[in-house]
Image (cartoon, grey):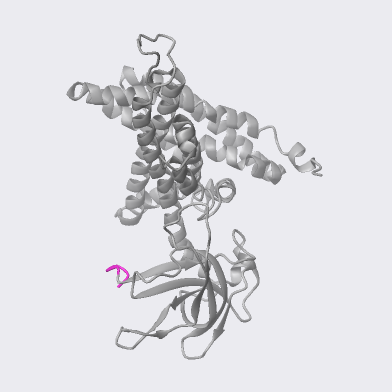
């Protein structure tokens, strides 16, 4: 019924006292000795928490069984329906789930984001006792990729609107103006063109990386060779926080640039750009804040029981970029320079984890950005290989791609080195600073 769309579902994690740190949650589950539990507590910020669009809503709720260990090790997962389900599968009486309020949010107004109260609601444990987070994160990890794609999608809409506006709006004369009526279209101004190309080069590179990551996800789920399957799974694990964080942070940059291109009209509600900015602002926050994603990356994702994942990922990039085409060599040379920077960052990170974890934490966001910019450049190399090989078949299309990639390598990729230099300054000043 969920697949048919007759029922819908939610994920209920966050509470007033816990967001990122779920070990603090207070929701309780009392065993009823008949296979069910009574769930009591309050959850907040629940997307599509209550509505009348479907016959029933199935809430997946994190709660702590009486006597369970403290912290995250004592959390279990429960299925709690809005309406109880009869033996024949039909919808029965109302369960002990009620809506406390609908959140008054900055953006995503179309989402019924609710406070939900569970008052001895009947629920059923899913999976093993005290292993609820493990079960929930099978969904959370996919959702993090989806949120990254949400940031990418909003960026694309912002770019399309900005491009159209720039072609229609006349303001001022360019340095080489030939206009006789006193003004040129703003798309002729160098800084507007830079801004548009910044948006376009990031968006198209991100999209290419998403296609690659989606393909790796399929390999991780369905490939018959266990070794290839595991490597793909490791790469997906490595890049999930990158896609979630980089795409959403750059989504904020792009929607802000879109508003700037629209000028005063962008700040008003006439053009819809301010809505894109507001709607995108949640993406660096929900499904795990971007700071948490960065910490997860540097402390957990670079290495795991399968070894040094980041080293294997970089070796994979180098192998796939061994392309015998002279036209692509300048791009590969630039990528290799930044792969060297990333390798130095890895060495620094590995050493600092042993010596001073505050240094690693303070550098986590910079590391994620460095890995992200390099990964998008890698995706651009894969695009460029096709462009140069197929160029004669569609010169206009492929020339556009090549020039867009050139902007990325000239103007965006160099940010990676700046993040590296900033990060290795350490954390001593940060941690010793006296806030007043």
Q: In which quarter of the image is residue 90?
A: bottom left
What is the residue that sits farthest to the left in this orientation? 393
Q: Is residue 360 magenta?
A: no
**Front-lying residue, 428 or 59:** 59
Confirm whether residue 409 shows in the render: yes
Confirm whether residue 318 shows in the render: no
Q: Which residue is drawn at 45% across and 83% down?
A: 95
Side (left or right) of 221 relative to 247? left
What is the residue that sits farthest to the bottom in this orientation? 33
Q: Quadrant of the N terminus?
A: bottom left
Residue 279 to residue 263: above or below: below
Q: Where is residue 68 in the image (x, y as percent from the top left)?
A: 62, 77
Side (left or right) of 434 relative to 150? right
Q: Quadrant of residue 86?
A: bottom left
Q: Position of residue 103 (x, y in %)?
A: 53, 62
**Front-lying residue, 107 or 235:** 107
Q: Which residue is drawn at 70% across and 44% down?
A: 358
Q: Position of residue 203 (x, y in %)?
A: 39, 36
Residue 383 to residue 7: above or below: above
The span shown in magenta is 1-5
**Front-lying residue, 87 or 71:** 87
**Front-lying residue, 208 or 272:** 272
Q: In which quarter of the image is residue 197?
A: top left
Q: Residue at x 35, y 35 (%)?
A: 160
Residue 145 to residue 33: above or below: above
Q: Quadrant of the C terminus?
A: top right
């Amino acid at each position: 019924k969920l697949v048919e769309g007759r029922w819908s579902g939610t994920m209920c994690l966050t509470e007033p006292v816990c967001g990122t740190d779920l070990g603090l949650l207070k929701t309780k589950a009392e065993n009823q000795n008949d296979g069910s539990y009574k769930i009591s507590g309050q959850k907040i910020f629940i997307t599509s928490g209550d509505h009348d669009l479907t016959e029933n809503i199935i809430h997946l709720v994190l709660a702590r069984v009486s006597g369970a260990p403290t912290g995250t090790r004592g959390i279990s997962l429960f299925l709690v329906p809005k309406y109880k389900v009869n033996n024949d599968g039909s919808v029965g009486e109302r369960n002990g789930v009620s809506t406390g309020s609908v959140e008054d949010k900055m953006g995503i107004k179309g989402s019924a984001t609710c406070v939900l109260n569970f008052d001895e609601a009947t629920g059923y444990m899913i999976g093993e006792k005290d292993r609820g987070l493990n079960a929930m994160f099978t969904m959370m990890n996919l959702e993090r990729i989806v949120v990254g794609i949400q940031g990418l999608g909003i960026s694309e809409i912002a770019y399309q609107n900005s491009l159209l506006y720039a072609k229609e709006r006349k303001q001022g004369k360019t340095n080489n103006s030939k206009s006789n009526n006193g003004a040129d279209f703003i798309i002729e101004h160098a800084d507007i063109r830079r801004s548009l190309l910044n948006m376009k080069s990031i968006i198209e590179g991100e999209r290419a990386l998403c296609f690659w990551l989606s393909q790796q996800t399929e390999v991780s789920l369905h490939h018959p060779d266990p070794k290839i399957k595991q490597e793909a799974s490791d790469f997906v694990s490595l890049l999930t926080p990158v896609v979630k964080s980089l795409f959403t942070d750059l989504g904020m940059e792009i929607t802000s640039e879109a508003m700037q291109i629209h000028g005063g009209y962008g700040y008003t509600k006439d053009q819809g750009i301010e809505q894109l900015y507001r709607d995108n602002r949640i993406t660096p926050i929900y499904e795990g804040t971007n700071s948490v994603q960065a910490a997860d990356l540097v402390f957990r994702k670079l290495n795991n029981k399968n070894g040094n994942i980041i080293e294997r990922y970089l070796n994979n990039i180098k192998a796939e970029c061994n392309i015998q085409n002279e036209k692509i060599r300048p791009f590969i040379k630039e990528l290799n320079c930044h792969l060297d920077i990333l390798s130095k960052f890895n060495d620094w990170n590995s050493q600092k984890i042993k010596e001073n974890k505050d240094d690693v934490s303070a550098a986590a966001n910079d590391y994620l950005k460095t890995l992200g910019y390099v990964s998008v450049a890698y995706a651009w190399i894969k695009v460029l290989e096709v462009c140069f090989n197929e160029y004669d078949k569609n010169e206009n299309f492929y020339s556009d791609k090549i020039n867009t990639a050139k902007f990325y390598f000239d103007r965006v990729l160099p940010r990676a080195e700046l993040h590296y230099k900033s990060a290795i300054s350490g954390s001593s000043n940060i941690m010793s600073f006296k806030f007043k």
